[in-house]
Image (cartoon, rainbow, N blue to C red):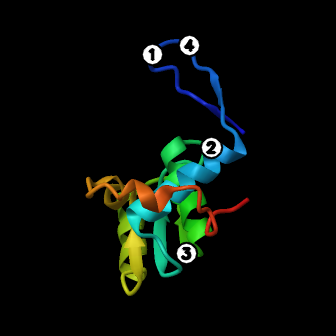
Amino acid sequence: MILYTSGTTGTPKGAELTHDNLRKNVAVAVGLFGLGSDAVTLGALPLFHSFGQTCGLNATVCAGGCLTLIPRFEPGKALEIIKRDSRQRLRTAHDLDRHREPPDAQSFSEDTSNSPS
């Protein structure tokens, strides 16, 4: 897959990501954020953004959770969705980005039984 950079430090360019890279990023995100089949993620970031794709779409789908996408971030609409989905475990980019204790390295060894191939 080619993920295009914004060019913050120079000219925008395509960063080539392998399937193995994507799989490992998802495994780390699922473990780090504790995502499971009960996860409901508010997809307010564009899916062409690395965080939106890896931690939003890929990790939530891999965990068997639900991703609620909104086409454009509007605070009122986001709050409606949060209220609607509050019965479930709703995660936002803010929740996923908060500092947490790092998981032990052993849990992210070559065991990828929960990761897509």
Q: Which residue is mark 2?
A: 21
* Residue closest to the far top: 10
Q: At label 1, which amino acid type do we have?
A: Thr
Q: Which residue is mark 1?
A: 9
Which label lies toward us, 2 or 1? 2
Find numbered disc 1 in the image and state the secondary structure of the residue it sits on: loop
Q: Residue drawn 52% across and 56% down?
A: 109
**Residue 92 visible:** yes
Q: At label 2, which amino acid type do we have?
A: Asn
The answer to which of marks 4 and 3 sits earlier in the sequence is 4
Q: At label 3, which amino acid type do we have?
A: Gly
Which label lies toward us, 3 or 2? 2
Question: Residue 79: where, in percent of width, then height?
Answer: 35, 69
* Residue closest to the far bottom: 87
Drawn side of residue 25 relative to residue 92, left or right: right
Between the C-alphas of marks 1 and 4, the distance is: 7 Å
Q: Which residue is mark 4?
A: 11
Question: Residue 18: where, in percent of width, then height?
Answer: 70, 39
